[in-house]
Image (cartoon, grey):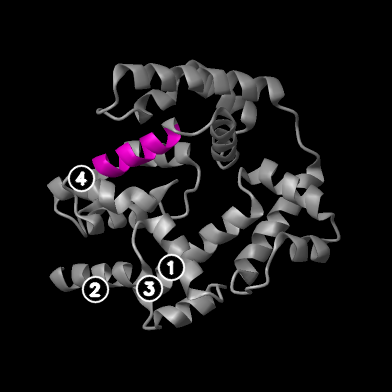
Amino acid sequence: MGTENTASAGSRNGSNPCSIAIVWREILRGVFPIIGRLALLTACPVEDLTEWLAPEAARHALSVVHELVWRDWLQSTLEAQQSDLQSYWRHLPCPFEETLRVWRDSRPYLTFVPVSAETQEREYFLGQMELLISILDSQHIPQPANSGRLADQVLRLIQERYADPHLSLRSVSRDLHVSEGHLGKLFRIETGFTFRRYLRQVRIQRAISLLECSGHGIKTICSLVGYQDLSHFTQYFRNATGTTPAEFRNKQRSQSAKA
């Protein structure tokens, strides 16, 4: 999601940026598909956040983040929306055919629309979802058995080696004895993400954990998660969370002091 505007959007809506960061940390961490985020935000009870926020503040923060994620989906291209839905469905416990049937018949996505959505936006969303479901149905072809195993190996290698600044699709494809182009295409089909984007998400999530739970300096954390350039790390972190690493840590400390 394009969260570089999260902090400013939260301020315009009268939300404390720290409360928005808590929603991202506690509810959306590790969830990359936009549709998956909308599903979680819709189902999240306020009680899940009352350890950190007062009930009214939690409700407002959930509403603001829901609106931000919703806007992100509306601004996506049809191709991006299709990739996003595919990625979300792959991580659901049901087989594809069962997921297809439920989404076509019961339309669970109806609950994803925020209260603030305009009629035209709601109609666009519903129309796009019906179109996307039809496209996925028509394009569904069972993948070869080894394709999933290869993607799983890539995911495992990313988790094991994200701290290596030289980790790349090329180095992984060399280790797995697969062509770089083939592996990149397969990984995107299986996960909905490019190798680079997924690696960046993993590194930023690890950086968030280190900022919250360790006493390491920001330069050290930058290195521990695989970045050699502090300015690049800061830019990627801001794009993912809406704040710089220093601002994020200061807000966490301030929140802990108030608790």
For residue 127, above or below residue 230: above
**Residue ID at (80%, 55%):** 180
The mark that comes first in sequence, 4 or 3, is 4
The picture places residue 98, in percent across and down from the top left corner, at: 59, 26
The picture places residue 87, in percent across and down from the top left corner, at: 58, 40
Residue designated by label 1: 234
**Relative side of 153 to 175, left or right:** left
The mark that comes first in sequence, 3 or 1, is 3
For residue 56, above or below residue 114: below
Q: Are marks 1 and 4 in contact (CB under 8 Å)?
A: no
**Residue ID at (79%, 60%):** 173
Magenta stretch: includes residue 67: yes
Label disc, if present, on residue 12 of the rendered structure: 4
| Magenta residues, start to end | 63-73
**Residue ID at (61%, 47%):** 193
Q: Main secondary structure of the magenta part?
A: helix
Quadrant where the image shows the C terminus:
bottom left
The reply to whether residue 53 is visible in this rendering is yes
Count residues near mark 1 (Cα–Cα under 10 Å), then give few for <14, some for 14-19, many for 20+.
Answer: many
CA separation in Å, label 1 and label 4: 23 Å
Residue designated by label 3: 211
Q: Amino acid at mark 2?
A: Arg
Q: Amino acid at mark 4?
A: Arg
Label disc, if present, on residue 253 of the rendered structure: 2
Label disc, if present, on residue 254 of the rendered structure: none
**Circle 4: element type:** helix
The mark that comes first in sequence, 2 or 1, is 1
